[in-house]
Image (cartoon, grey):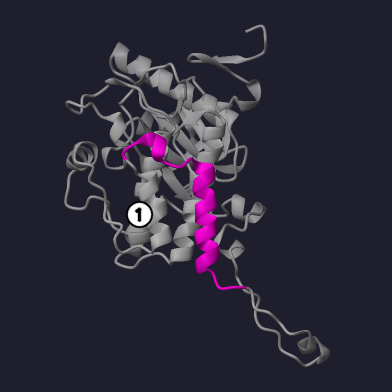
Amino acid sequence: MGDGFYSVGEFSLDPKWLIDPKLLFVGPKIGEGAHAKVYEGKYKNQNVAIKIVHKGETPEEIAKRDNRFAREVAMLSRVQHKNLVKFIGACKEPVMVIVTELLLGGTLRKYLLNLRPRCLDTRVAIGFALDIARAMECLHSHGIIHRDLKPENLLLTVDHKTIKLADFGLAREESLTEMMTAETGTYRWMAPELYSTVTLRHGEKKHYNHKVDAYSFAIVLWELIHNKLPFEGMSNLQAAYAAAFKNVRPSADDLPDDLALIVTSCWKEDPNSRPNFTQIIQMLLHYLSAISPPEPVIPARIFSSKNAVLPPESPGTSSLMAKRDDAGETPKTPIESKPRGFFFCFDQCC
């Protein structure tokens, strides 16, 4: 193209984001979804996560794959935030690949499962919720709805202190006039307005806005606090039906009043009554300050004695959030198996 941009699907990719497949090496598989497999790998001697998109079988599947890939790459390359997985690059040939930073802490889903039957410390749970809310605030400020906010799409850093939002495969740019499909997300975490008023028909056109993400956030926050599957005992479809048509929600009765208010306001039936993520962040910070111990007041006279023992520094809110430095951002764990050639691994694994 004359403007120096590389065409991918329905959009043009800035050459600075174009991955050279010859410099990409693939290691062990670390995840798999309906549309792609994710591998640990290396790119230019940097540890990365490599998402290889599945091939479509029918023309319709191929068209959907192309659109999903183009949309995800466009949004990843456009929006950057400390609580969003860092985008490194992509390529469409010889196969569709998206390369991001490698987070070795695993998914929030796996982390919570390994913790059961114990629960997160409330302050840690709120710290994680703030990470998620800040990522969502950033997306919404760019007019992007994620539509698939759930523990499987939330990744932890290797020290398990920070959460980053991943997987933009279902993300959409918000338009007040555009009708969007209800093919989105996982039923248990999906907002009720995404469903048909008659039945849960795949692909039905619906009017909705960014407040669908606030509902999903409420379910994730409830899960962070209780470390239980929301709508336990129900299938995904049963949970969706109960939430959409019977206004059923997980119980917030055992939550402190301030925290219950945050959760229940976010999952209100009327989307317009739900807070936006800027408001959610302020509510979470207010609650965190209320439950965190105050900084100790040290009398001035204590400093007069050179032998005085000062109390340990209060952890405060900052210790609950990530300490972000280069060491924390770049995982140090090497790929266990010797990296294999990119094309060989694709032929073998996909």
Q: Report whether residue 345 is seen.
A: yes
Q: Residue at x 50, y 55 (%)?
A: 284
Q: Is 140 situated above or below 66?
A: below
* Residue 127, image x, y percentages: 51, 58
As drawn, 297 above or below 222: below
Using the image as rendered, state which of residue 28 and residue 298 is in the foreground.
Answer: 298
- In the picture, the quarter occupied by the N terminus is top right
- For the stretch drawn in magenta, the main secondary structure is helix
Residue 96 occupies which quadrant of the picture?
Answer: top left
Q: Is residue 196 left or right of residue 36?
A: left
* Residue drawn at point x = 44 percent, y = 29 percent: 171
Q: Which residues are magenta?
A: 269-294
Quadrant housing residue 21: top right
Residue for point 60% across, 73% down: 294
Horizontal side of residue 63 vs 275, given as left or right: left
Circle 1 SS class: helix
Q: Is residue 41 visible?
A: no
* Position of residue 71 in the picture relative to residue 186 (left or right): right
User: What residue would you read off at disc 1?
Assistant: 222
Question: For mark 1, does the 10 Å Cα neighbourhood hold few (<14), some (14 to 19), or many (20 or more) residues?
Answer: many
Q: Amino acid at mark 1?
A: Trp
Tell me where residue 141 sits by quadrant.
Answer: top right
